[in-house]
Amino acid sequence: MKLLSDDGLHDIVNESWNAYGQFTYVTNWKLAFPADYTNLNGSINSLLPTAERSFTGTATLYLGVKLWTGAEAYLVPEIISELPFDQLKGLGGAIQNSELQKGGTETPQIYHSRAYLKQTIGFGGERVVKESGQMQLGTTYDSRRLVLVAGNFSILDFFDKNAFDIDPRQSFLSLGFLTYAAWDFASDARGYSYGAVAELYWDDWAVRYGRITPPKNPNQLAIDFRLFKYYGDQIELEHHHKIHGREGIVRLLGYRNHEDIGRFSDAIAVWEADPAKNATTCPGFNYGSDNANAPDLCWVRKPNVKVGAGMFAEQHLTSDIGLFARGMYSDGKTEVDAYTSTDRSATVGLLGKGSAWHRPTDVAGIGLNLGWISKIHAEYLALGGIDGFIGDGAIKAGMENSLDLFYSVNIRKSFWLTGDFQHVVNPGFNQDRGPVNIFGLRLHGEF
Amino acid sequence: MANFKSRCIRSACLAFLIFAACPSHADAQQVTQGYAVERFYPSAPGAGWFVMDDVNLSGGLGGAISLTTSYSHNPLVVTSPDGAQRLVLVSNEAFADVGFAITYDRYRFYLDLPVPLVVTGNSGTVGPYQVTAPSLNVAQNPDTLSDVRLGFDMRLLGDPGGLFRLGAGAQLLIPSGDRADYVTDGRYGGMFRILPAGDIGRFSYAGQFGVHIRPDEGLVLPGSPDGNELLFGVSAGRKFALRNRWHLIVGPEFFGESAIHSSSRDQTGFEGLLTGRLEKMSDRPHLRLKAGIGHGIVQHFGAPEWRVLVGVELVSHRPSK
């Protein structure tokens, strides 16, 4: 768009349309690691202790158009090819690559990740310049405004935006840094939802609310459009501040999901009352465990509520270095429906650009990602149960934590090559397994 | 070890060749694969007609976006070779096509993203063929795109708004979606078209002739095309001037495809549409509203019993005066 603008063919400040694209290839190598047991008694969700390679390749086209005053429409077709470790099983928030999708295949799949309308209603205040970019027309808004969004999108397009506005495809690789690992936001298996979001910006403050569709069955692609029966609600309060002239943001987020999901305590109670109702006999949707002596959530899925609350803060320490932290506590009573198995999470990280060594477009980061499961969740896993991602057949419950180090080199104008290392302790929240070392490379380009 | 591996590979290859060379039992029921049934390929955004192209390409950098929704009834009916059995394999098919076009001077690049909304039908057995109906809906397939089209058109001869223009276009079809849903061929395809068009006073016309490059897979389903197809079509309409520079253009469009490999009668689908579009003649970005209703004149593979179409376009390049 900038090239067209430079040639006088496009107004990039007040855009009527724009088009951007990206491609990202990520490959990871997991080294062999120690494990006291793997897929014990027919359970199926262990991360295999053998060395493995995983990859994702994505390409995305971001199309935006201005329809009328204050109205913008965006359509984002995307293609993905992927090979996860062990069909994405055995890890909670420490899944090593946030590009991975549930149910993905090596055969490339094309889909529309986003198709939504956005209407902005100005209420005055200062003029805020928004630069042209992916899913953003170059324009100016009032600092006091109401933004209404409806359609198909990722809730992360509006809530808990990534630290320092750095594209996740140029930042940490691990899933735990994409957002709160404990936020089981409603979405399909790829991470996208249908629904609506309302945002009210008032100078340094913003409050947003969204209602979105959950999957029809946990962690599957089909979605349930009955938004008054099954839904994910979230509300977020945001404040921008300056400390010693350096910008920072604080956000509080709360969510409440009403979904067709199973409670761990119910699954245990049903199985204890009648051992015939185990993980191998349920006729409904299940994950296919072969453990005949284990409870299963399949027997107890019904409309249930899941709630959680979290806090995020980021602070620029210098013009090029920033510190961020986020943490969330979810109730941990019910199974994962859409994101990952973590019930409580905390991350802290440091991100910096390479200005000090004369490479201002390089990005480096170091982060710690911590995750826990609830007591009843651990009890269910200890009895041999599985959820959408974890379940080794037994468990000595502990905190799953991972250290993520990366350096992203700007090799040409719009191309970055990233080297990454992750050290995961207690994979799948199980002290009897790991630690796991994972190396990664990422090539990312934008146009 | 290397010799053993080599022998294994040779043995496997030999076994495969023997297996592949064996004729299948004619009596056994044959299970068929799905293919892209829809033969309504919306024209590029800003191209005027639903299928044809007015090739009115001129001016500076411009563009258009479009949303075209279509519903077709009974687009694929399978009849046994002896004509005794008949099965409506695809009975309901609805798409929403989202298109983006960028134009400059006499050139146009565009992208068409077809979103299948509903594709349903009836399973059954027709003669020796066992077929399974598609079952696609937005809830089950919330983000499916069927074969994405990337296109390039150019005006070769004639002036915008003139008596005769000749254009040419090419499209790349990128496979997407599930063959079982009858929304994709599962392979890359292409189209090459010659596009005559013109304006004579209050009348406009356009046509297309070309070839659709499709995979040749030996499809055996009766009445289904296999491999490359010829594309043809013609449209004509009259302009009615309304108030405030609004115009209504009404006229028919006829289009079809005919399988090249077999020119037998049931290898051609041919369809007629009565279309109307309402637009404001303006140099500024303007809306174009389109509607159409159609009937399969020769109802084979994708030419339905009837079809309804509604489209809306936002066009920012200058239309002909």
Image (cartoon, rainbow, N blue to C red):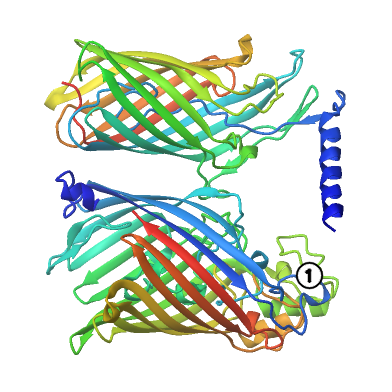
Left-right relation of A289 to B291 = right
Of the residues shown, which amino acid type is indicated by label 1? Ala
Q: Under tag 1, what secondary structure?
A: loop
Instruction: Name the residue beneath numbered marker 1.
Output: A279
| Residue shown at 27% from the left, 73% from the top | A206
The crowd level at tag 1 (other Cα within 10 Å; few <14, some 14-19, many 20+) is: many
User: Looking at the image, which is closer to me, A421 or B270?
Assistant: A421
- Say whether residue A373 is visible: no
- Say whether residue A56 is visible: yes
Left-right relation of A51 to B211 = right
Q: From the top left corner, tell me how far across and down residue A24 is, in percent.
A: 45, 59
Q: From the top left corner, tell me how far across and down residue B105 is, in percent.
A: 21, 30
Q: Quadrant of residue B56?
A: top left
Left-right relation of B314 to B137 = left
| Residue shown at 51% from the left, 40% from the top | B117
Q: Quadrant of residue B283?
A: top left
Q: Is the residue A335 above or below the residue B189 in the image?
A: below
Q: From the top left corner, tell me how far across and down residue A255 is, in percent.
A: 45, 74
